[in-house]
Image (cartoon, rainbow, N blue to C red):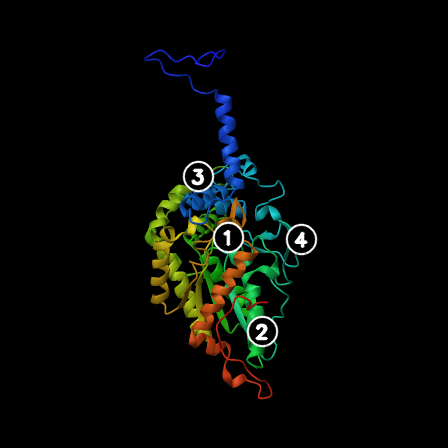
């Protein structure tokens, strides 16, 4: 023992040594977490990097939303009637995740009008021009989130109508950043490079939270008026949830007329009756769960009937129809989570001879925090929309029948030097 230095006392045999002070442990753990966030691990440590990215991007919040997608989309459109309509987490929890006070739900943005007693329920207001989430949100005079188009189709113009929901509408991004407008830009540039006398207009008929039946109704009421030459229907992994919301809403709103024979027949087969539709003195449905329980076994049959009706309409009008599966960002639409839905959509498309472009792997193996509009909202941001555009453009270019219809050699201008078909490159829209 060194002279003048007292030995450190040893605990008596059988006595547990005291732990460090809890405050010191807490400080050390906090410091370790901060250092881990600031200093990225080596690239070869893939497991640790994945775990850290998952923690950073609030994937738990995304998974919780996926467990109750109905609440999430009721929150998006402002329905549900509960105190936690934004999703399964409370508003306080979302604020703690960083959600700013000005971040609003779709219906609170005051960009839609409710159509009382109408099967379609709501639509975008025309001539909107405001800033949402730091991005311009505009609609044209016809109430579409798109450029202003005349109903009369100009000569030499090929029109594509896009039917979809929030991701296709471009929730959270500017109009020029949406994959729909990027597609239009590429089509026109590619036609010019090939020396074709053709102009393209891709008309965005998508509305946030539209279910498949609402997209079909929108096609009949609005899209057909533009005399399109092709239709692209967007399908998502949330479409069954959106169907459930829409069906409950039409009964809540006491919609009298169901416009489709196949839907009336399915409702009849479900056994839904007046007892299930009882209301309280304020006119609200007493038990939505009973309606859901009656109709839930038929949701996929309703989806099949919806796409069957759309396909029949397109055949009757001589319009090619393609279905594109559009994913959300993150684990909610991971390969394991989406497998059953993809298989069902493939079966429905085959049943009705619809060309199917499966874009569901567009965001696989990519950092969600770089592609979503916010940690609490898994809609794609501008970069995500660019990736969706590239995936869709490549699919169109690889399908010979569709490509030849879009860019027929008979339209070539003999005074122009055309380029070869070629692949869709990463700079296709620049």
Q: Whole-percent x and y of residue 35?
A: 52, 37
Disc number for residue 209: 1
Residue 324: percent from left, percent from top:
44, 63
Residue 281 drawn above or below residue 191: above
Q: Visible in this render: residue 307?
A: yes
Residue at (54%, 62%) from the top-left corner?
A: 179
Q: Which of marks 2 and 4 is in front?
A: 2
Query: What's the distance in space between the residues labelled 2 and 4, CA to CA?
Result: 29 Å
Q: How far apart are marks 4 and 3 (CA)?
A: 38 Å
Which quadrant holds the N terminus? top left
Q: How far apart are marks 3 and 2 (CA)?
A: 55 Å
How far apart marks 4 and 1 lie (CA) works out to 20 Å
Image height of 278 relative to 116, above or below: above
Give the SS element for disc 4: strand
Mark 2 sits on what residue?
A: 189
Look at 63% across and 70% down and name the residue there.
150
- Residue 205 at least partly seen: no
According to the picture, the residue beneath numbered tag 4 turns out to be 130
Q: Quadrant of the C terminus?
A: bottom right
Q: What element carries label 3?
A: loop
Indicate left or right for 418 with 68 as reference.
right
Rendered location of residue 61, percent (x, y): 47, 41
Q: Which mark is residue 286?
A: 3
- Look at the numbered disc 1 and give the secondary structure of its residue: loop
């Amino acid at each position: 023992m060194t002279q003048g230095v007292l030995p450190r006392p040893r605990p008596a045999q059988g006595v547990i040594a005291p732990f460090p002070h809890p405050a010191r442990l807490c400080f050390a753990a906090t410091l370790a977490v901060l250092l881990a966030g600031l200093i990225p691990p080596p690239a070869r440590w893939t497991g640790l990097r994945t775990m850290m990215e998952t923690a950073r991007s609030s994937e738990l919040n995304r998974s919780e939303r996926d467990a109750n997608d109905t609440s999430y989309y009721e929150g998006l459109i402002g329905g549900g009637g509960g105190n936690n309509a934004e999703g399964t987490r409370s508003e306080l929890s979302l604020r703690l995740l960083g959600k700013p006070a000005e971040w609003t739900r779709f219906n609170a943005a005051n960009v839609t009008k409710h159509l009382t007693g109408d099967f379609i329920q709501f639509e975008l207001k025309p001539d909107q021009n405001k800033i949402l989430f730091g991005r311009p949100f505009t609609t044209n005079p016809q109430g579409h989130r798109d450029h202003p188009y005349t109903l009369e189709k100009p000569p030499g113009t090929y029109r594509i109508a896009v039917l979809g929901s929030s991701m296709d509408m471009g929730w959270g991004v500017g109009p020029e950043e949406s994959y729909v407008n990027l597609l239009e830009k590429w089509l026109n540039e590619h036609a010019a490079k090939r020396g074709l006398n053709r102009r393209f207009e891709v008309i965005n008929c998508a509305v946030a939270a539209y279910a498949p039946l609402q997209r079909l109704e929108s096609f009949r009421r609005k899209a057909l008026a533009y005399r399109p030459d092709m239709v692209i229907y967007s399908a998502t992994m949330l479409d069954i949830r959106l169907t459930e919301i829409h069906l409950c809403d039409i009964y809540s709103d006491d919609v009298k007329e169901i416009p489709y024979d196949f839907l009336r027949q399915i409702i009849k087969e479900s056994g839904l009756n007046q007892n299930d539709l009882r209301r309280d003195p304020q006119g609200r449905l007493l038990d939505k769960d009973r309606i859901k329980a009656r109709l839930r076994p038929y949701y996929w049959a309703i989806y099949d009937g919806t796409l069957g009706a759309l396909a029949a309409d397109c055949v009757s009008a001589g319009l090619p129809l393609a279905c594109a599966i559009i994913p959300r960002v993150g684990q909610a639409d991971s390969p394991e989570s989406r497998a059953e839905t993809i298989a069902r959509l493939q079966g429905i498309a085959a049943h009705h001879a619809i060309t199917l472009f499966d874009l569901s792997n567009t965001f696989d193996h990519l950092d969600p925090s770089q592609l979503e509009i916010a940690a609490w909202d898994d809609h794609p941001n501008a970069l995500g929309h660019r990736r969706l555009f590239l995936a869709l453009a490549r699919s169109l270019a690889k399908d010979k029948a569709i490509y030849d219809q879009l860019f027929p050699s008979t339209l070539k201008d003999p005074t122009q030097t055309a380029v070869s078909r070629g692949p869709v490159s990463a700079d296709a829209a620049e």
